[in-house]
Image: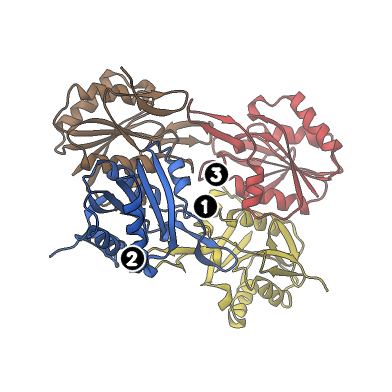
Chain colours: A yellow, B red, C brown, D blue
Amino acid sequence: MIRIFATGGTFDKEYNMLTGELFFKDTHLDELLQKGRCMAPATIETLMMIDSLEMNNQHRNTIAEHCRNCEEDKIIITHGTDTMTETASFLAERFTNKTIVLTGAMIPIKFGSSDGLFNLGCAIAFVQTLTPGVYVAMNGRIFKAGTVWKNKESGLFEERLG
Amino acid sequence: MIRIFATGGTFDKEYNMLTGELFFKDTHLDELLQKGRCMAPATIETLMMIDSLEMNNQHRNTIAEHCRNCEEDKIIITHGTDTMTETASFLAERFTNKTIVLTGAMIPIKFGSSDGLFNLGCAIAFVQTLTPGVYVAMNGRIFKAGTVWKNKESGLFEERLG
Amino acid sequence: MIRIFATGGTFDKEYNMLTGELFFKDTHLDELLQKGRCMAPATIETLMMIDSLEMNNQHRNTIAEHCRNCEEDKIIITHGTDTMTETASFLAERFTNKTIVLTGAMIPIKFGSSDGLFNLGCAIAFVQTLTPGVYVAMNGRIFKAGTVWKNKESGLFEERLG
Amino acid sequence: MIRIFATGGTFDKEYNMLTGELFFKDTHLDELLQKGRCMAPATIETLMMIDSLEMNNQHRNTIAEHCRNCEEDKIIITHGTDTMTETASFLAERFTNKTIVLTGAMIPIKFGSSDGLFNLGCAIAFVQTLTPGVYVAMNGRIFKAGTVWKNKESGLFEERLG
């Protein structure tokens, strides 16, 4: 069994046509799993709907608590990309016995060109096959927490050297 | 390094607006990897563009030959869903030292509702993490060759009992 | 008030993932009007859901009857493109006091690349502004019934000479 | 012959995945006309790429100048929705001998749910059939300049009373 915690991020941003701004309403994870015709047993739970620039350690504690208390030992966390690696490191200090995979999207799902469905597919597969630990799944790759950063110029996740 | 062999299937079907029929032109795998912003090193090669109902053992031999001759030991094969499990079994008899993942789509990529991008994400992740063997990656799940069938009523891949 | 009669055609074709064939379920006209945020007062009614190659004079009589009996004098008919011009000519012999606009799509709505939403926008606008008569609205153009044919090589509607 | 002047607006906004903001790059009008398989003879020219909240009378003078100087007497202007009705009134004071139709979108074209393709279809049809004057084409309806306002609560264009 897989538990998916939604925390917001670009992934779930929608366009408010009255204000012209991007905002959060609900997660689109269930639609995506349906589109992917996913039969891997997964339960989705929304913990928060925030931009990852607003993600602080109080939020991270909430996430950690839910990771601890849920029965599943395979966990996917959808998360904004800007601070995804920080949250991964935060969780890596607290969990060694569960497989936790963070993923997100650079382009909102509601845009035709979103990477979200691909990333979710990767996360669903990685979480089922990786040994316990905390990981970031982006760009079709998998990174151990603490070994990855987001290159803000290219928007790509890369190995952190040294 | 990952090698991706395209063989056709629903995945790559397009709509011919002059005849009203679905047909094959080129693979859409490169567009999909770009959409997924995939940085996992992957080379795409089209072996054939056929409906999997037309797939016979001569085609399968061609696929096997390419699996044997390519340098990579991580291989993804996109394949029509109707005979995907047969091709998986065929390859499983011939390969034990490479990780070969077959995937496809129930709905063509060019349809808004396609499962193809999700499935490709899964395949990219599974091929990087699984031990050598031949697998089918569909519905967010992974099946060992020989243990899976396509339920033609539901369109879902399931464990084969007995 | 506008009356929209759906008769099927490429417009409303969907992909049956179990058989790999295109088929008709329901019309997508209501979704399209919603997407277009259309506030022009329009009522949608499905008369039949057929490929226009199957459209015979019995079907055309049914359409004519509904055009005659409805209260609205502004009518849009969605129709397969193959015999759209025949149906237009058929109706032109019977109606001179209503504005009847036939439109359709070369690519099903469910494909990302469909021309259907554009064509429906054209039809909604043309039906509100044209004087009574029967017309074909395709390719952003308007043609009087009897003066138009579908070029099957290009898939474009053109003036019929002579 | 139809001349289309692009001035920006929601229509042409794209998502900058590095900053998470919406921005302007190029107009998508050519892609849309191609998608609509539009054969109505139309030339697209980009005059500016701005949010309509930034549209001032200097911009409007530029638009007016281009409307005056172009050879075509059928003109479509794509425009942000917030001040579209002001620009329409501005132009209505200056033009009586050309048919000028303003349109736009509430949701960017790049979002799957955009109304832009529908609106462009409407504008293409209205501009070919309406007598000279300045109009707003939104929500599948046509409004004379000076008789329309945008209801900012509903995001719909409505008749202005009194």
Give the side of residue A143 with respect to residue D136, left or right. Answer: right
Q: Are marks 3 and 1 on the same chain?
A: no
Q: Which residue is mark 1?
A: A112
Q: Which quadrant of the structure image shows residue C158?
A: top left
Query: Which amino acid, mark 3?
Result: Ser
Q: Position of residue C32 (x, y in %)?
A: 36, 46
Helix, strand or loop at label 1? It is loop
User: Which mark is drawn over residue B151?
Assistant: none
Mark 2: give few (<14), some (14-19) or many (20+) Cα within 10 Å: many
Helix, strand or loop at label 2? It is loop
* Mark-to-mark CA distance, 2 and 3: 36 Å
Instruction: Return the chain for callout 3.
Output: B
Give the camera-side residue of D105 and B14.
D105
Q: Position of residue B118 (x, y in %)?
A: 61, 50
Give the side of residue B150 with respect to residue B68, left or right. Answer: left
* Mark-to-mark CA distance, 3 and 1: 12 Å
Q: Quadrant of the C terminus of chain C?
A: top left
Query: Which amino acid, mark 1?
Result: Gly
Query: Which amino acid, mark 2?
Result: Asp
